[in-house]
Amino acid sequence: MLKSLEIKGCLKLKTLDLGGTPNLESLHIEECSSLVKLLAPIGGLKKLTNLKAKGFLRFTNLYIEESYGSLPSLDLHGKLIDTCPLHPDDNFPKFQFDCTYREDLPSLIGNVEKLISVGSSCACTDLVSFFGSNCGLQHLGYLTLQGDIPEAPKDLGSLQCLERFTFRSTSIKHLPDSILFLKHLKSLLLLDCELLEKLPEDLGRLECLERLILKRCLVLRDIPNSICRLKSLKYLSLEDSIRVEKLPEELGRLECLEELDIQGTSIKNLPPSISLLGGLKIVRSEEGTTRTTTTGGCCMVLYRIFSSWHEWILLHCNNNRM
């Protein structure tokens, strides 16, 4: 009854079939440069709780680790490489990934076997197919993509349990509209997306979103008005997104907003409706330093009095003209 397997320095090993190891709990593979296929039938590794594999095809490193009491998480760090080990003369773009997957193991949903299968694809397999396979993982709650990744997965919407999506890429220009189908998404972090030109216009459909962080999105100019429909939003950061000059006029509709970080942006004036948000913490840059202020509860009253007085003046003037 094999429970632990460690393979190191087997330079001639090309295929490893794990179908006959249903009791395997730990697997370590290292320095097997000829390994091109790792076979793991769905349901065949129900007891596996630890896997470390270095240097085979799509994954530079593959770590499968146990976590307790949380949804499965997947971290992928992409790197553009010059040569595919299987197709050295191929001209297609070639990517390898460091992959870390965490789940409350042993897995009963087949994600471990799927990842092993994905890792057995060659480095020049197109990213659409690669990400499509990853978006087929069951019950994935947290996804992090970073490194040399030119685009976000088009099938993001199929990750119905996703609660946090973190994307760090200097190449991405657009987000796929499929992200709007992530009905349980609570955190969206776009970090160092320097070429990101715009956000989905209907971003307000992410009704469970609590944290929206757009950090160092250097080309981004406009924040869609639809974010004013994010009724659960508590934290909004545009830190160092230098070309953003204004916020949506109805930002005051975000009743749950607790903190707004606009340091390093080109925002000089806040929309008047923000006065409705008593107790809002605002972080901004002034004269080379970071300054934090908090809106007072009285601002709501003053704003409403001013609005009512302005409406009364207009009505009074109109009546005098009649």
Image (cartoon, rainbow, N blue to C red):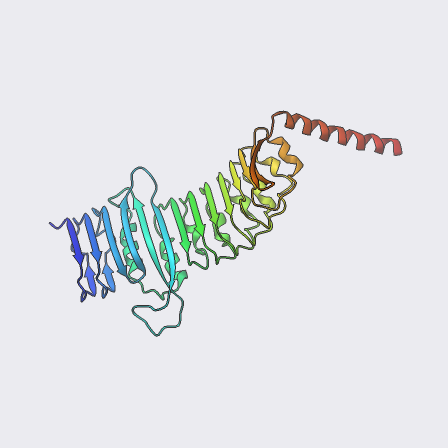
Residue 106 in the image: x percent, y percent?
A: 24, 44
Is 41 on the left-hand or right-hand side of 283?
left
Instruction: Please indicate whether residue 309 sits to the left or right of residue 163 in the image.
Output: right
Whether residue 233 is visible to the viewer of this picture, yes or no, is no
Q: Quadrant of residue 40?
A: bottom left
Question: Of 294 and 22, which appears nearest the observer?
Answer: 294
Q: Position of residue 189 (x, y in %)?
A: 47, 46
In the figure, 230 relative to 175: above or below? above
Residue 9 appears anywhere in the view: yes
Name which residue lies at 23% across and 59% down: 39
**Residue visible at 32% across and 50% down?**
100
Q: Position of residue 221 (x, y in %)?
A: 60, 51
In the rendered image, the quadrant that contains the C terminus is top right
Find the residue positioned furthest to the bottom: 89
Residue pictured at 64% horizontal, 28% vertical? 299
The image shows residue 26 at horizontal and vertical percentages of 19, 49
Is 80 positioned to the left or the right of 28 in the image? right
Quarter-of-image position of residue 225: top right
